[in-house]
Image: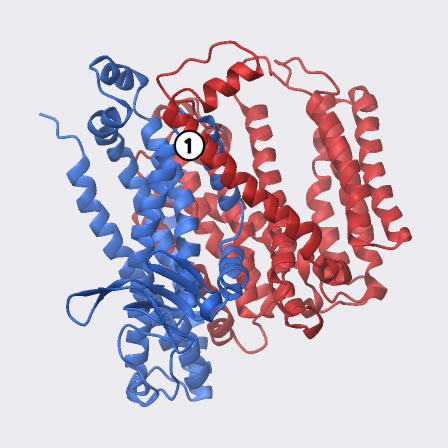
Chain colours: A blue, B red
Amino acid sequence: MATPWWRNRQAFPWLMQALVGLVVLLLIAFLVGNLVRNLTAAGLLLSWHWLGQPAGFDIGESVLPFGAELPYWRGLLAGLANTLRAVIFGLIGATVLGTLAGMASFSSNGLLRRLVRLYVEVVRNLPLLLQLFFWYFVVFLSLPNGTDALQLPGVVLAKSGLYLAGLQNGLQWGGPQLVNGVWQAPLRMSVEFAALLTGLVVFSGAYIAEVVRGGLASVPRGQWEAAASLGLGWLASLRHVVIPQALRVIVPGLNSEYISLAKNSSLAVAVGYADLYSVAETTLNQTGRAVEVVILLLSAYLVLDLLISAAMKGINQLVQIRER
Amino acid sequence: MNPPLPSSGSPLPSSGSPSLPPPTRIRPPGGVVDRLRRELFSTPADGMLSLALISVISTGLFSLLRWGFVKAEWAVVQVNSTLFAVGRYPSAEQWRLWLLTTLLAAATGITWGLLRAFPRPDRSSRPWPRNDFIAVAVLLLLALWTPWALGLKLLIAARWLGIATLLIALRWLAGRFGPQLSRKRVGWLALAWPLLYLLGMVLINGGLWMATVPSARWGGLLLTLLEASFAILICFPLGVLLALGRRSELPLLRWGSVLYIEFIRGAPLITLLFLGQNILGFLLPGGMAPDRVWRAAWVLTFFAAAYLAEAVRSGLAAIPKGQLEAARALGLTTPQALQHVVLPQALRIALPVMVGQFISLLQDTTLLSLIGLMELLGTARTVMANPDFLGHYGEVYLTLAVLFWCCCAALGLGSRALERRLDPSHTPSRS
């Protein structure tokens, strides 16, 4: 007796697959058809000419020079540069903070361990956006200005910005100075950028701390004991024995944290820092070019993610234990 | 926003695991003083560190308390408590929300009691474990303290107390008389939850004989919970299907799932919400596009499904291939084998990661405030734009922080309780 076609184990899966494919294709055709029809009706068919028109808006601060008379594509590029700036500094800061916190959760000091636990639990259970608003409105915007500003060695925190010591006019080391009631320094950070950076570093730091803690915990206890019996101290056993073994667990975990950080940097719009998303939103509001703007946005973040993944893949290969 | 995903071999740091003691130390017995000395002052360096930390912590705590009790003006939260709870939901229709809250409390009480009445057969358990007493005490305390702190009217405070009492009374009744029901009948009672959800939707939205309340008037905690619960419920089946699709042997299904998952995971949520608000209208024939609130809800759902799929995939990857093969050898079809053998195990393994995703989804609802919806954070921003309450950022954000922290912590606690109940090892429970 021949098996009916729906019990045929060769044909049935392919039929199913063809059916699903057909449905998906029909759905896509339906959506794209609507898109083309609606865009034509609105006179917004896909075109990239508007990118060359003058933007007409200015952005608060940017790494690349930008002004209202420059075209849209320069504005989007400036936004991308601002995003990259936040991501790069955020990655460095979060890695340092997360590593310290992750290591501190193995400290012999019970208070320090519990403090790290508290930090991780509080930060991970609160929305990042809320944290960013907190840093911006409650902390940075309530800083005093002028002579009352918070003065630390080499750093001045004021409502008008963060002033850092650095090299100026060639090779002279200079600190922040008050000139006619206005702070001036070799390096200045806007409060928007400072709030974004603090928020991202504190948030990602907590997640990275957990990755680092998990990595260190994955090293068997015997390794610590063996290191101790060889006469190595806490720091020396950590450096020479535990970390090299923990890294191969930590690095893949870091990859997803770094990608999260890059994506989370898009919340900069909430604190008024002109990152890629914020510029794109303004561009859309001015031009109405929704589809093009969204395509540019999504591909920019996708490329950023791929770059981070590729870099982490390289690092991962370095830290893997080479077996003979 | 996105908790760590289980990429190759990373040891899923679950947020709940207690901090491990340093690996070279064994905990010796001793009193409180001994323990303090050992934990804080074991070496001179530790002692110095402890003193420094204690001084920093006490200064911080002192200034926080001084701010909270002296400087802060909590009127901004008290006056706007209704706005934070339900947004601009018309006051004439708010009885529906009270009814829904009462029904939810009743269902919670009954479920809680029945769970205690029907413990796992392989475990001994008391009808009133210590944790339940703590939970009841916390509940009563909240029902008494919150209305007083918010300065609610006596009538409304009495309602909250009544709802809390109802919950506890039903918990007691269900625990006391539950064992007389048959296990099968109790299983049917679980269906009450999806029905209650549908009823809740009808109550909130209107319909039947009730007037419709437009979604633009939903707000505050109501909108936050609605968006989060909707996305969690719908993304679950989608995520499981996507995970199965990604592991399927059929290339079209596999590549379709991979493409979808990676596309969603590569984009920040805010850009997807932006896409939903600006392009969804173009993608559907005129008039068919949902309104802003539902657009956001669907975007959240599709977003969460991709992350959930990865969580489920990590669970599927942990199931040995032999399980499916054995089930097939017993004559089960592949769908049957997946349903009865593979998925129950995979989902149990993936549970902590999935709950982690749900927690971050709840947190991600705050992003809706950036596209102009009045969920909790959006409400907070409009309240603070009111000239009467200008500059009271600290009070409002602290309130929201406590609220979110409690919701997320509650989800985490529930997840751990569920994990214990589903734990396959036949060990007597400790609680």
Note whether B63 is above or below A178 in the view shown.
Answer: above
Q: Residue furthest right?
A: B155
Residue B4, visible in the rendered structure: no
Label 1: how many Cα within 10 Å (few below 14, some 14–19, many 20+): some
Front-lying residue, B17 or A161:
A161
**x 28%, y 75%: residue:** A77
From the viewer's perspective, is B421 left or right of B20?
right
| Residue A292 lies in quadrant | bottom left
At which x and y percent is residue B343? 47, 33
Q: Residue furthest left?
A: A324
Task: State which chain disc 1 sits on.
Answer: B
Note whether B119 is above or below B205 in the view shown.
Answer: above
Front-lying residue, A231 or A150:
A150
Residue under pointer 1: B49
Count of numbered tags: 1
From the viewer's perspective, is B259 left or right of A284?
left
Front-lying residue, A135 or B360:
A135
Q: Quadrant of the C terminus of chain B?
A: top right
At which x and y percent is residue A68? 35, 87
Residue B200, visible in the rendered structure: yes
From the viewer's perspective, is B136 left or right of A324?
right
Q: Residue furthest top?
A: B29
At which x and y percent is residue B251? 30, 48
Instruction: Tell me which amino acid carries mark 1.
Output: Leu
Note whether B255 is above or below A82 in the view shown.
Answer: above
**x 68%, y 56%: residue:** B71
| Residue B185 lies in quadrant | top right
SS class, disc 1: helix
Front-lying residue, B65 or A289:
B65
**x 44%, y 71%: residue:** A160
**x 51%, y 71%: residue:** B277
At which x and y percent is residue A103? 35, 33
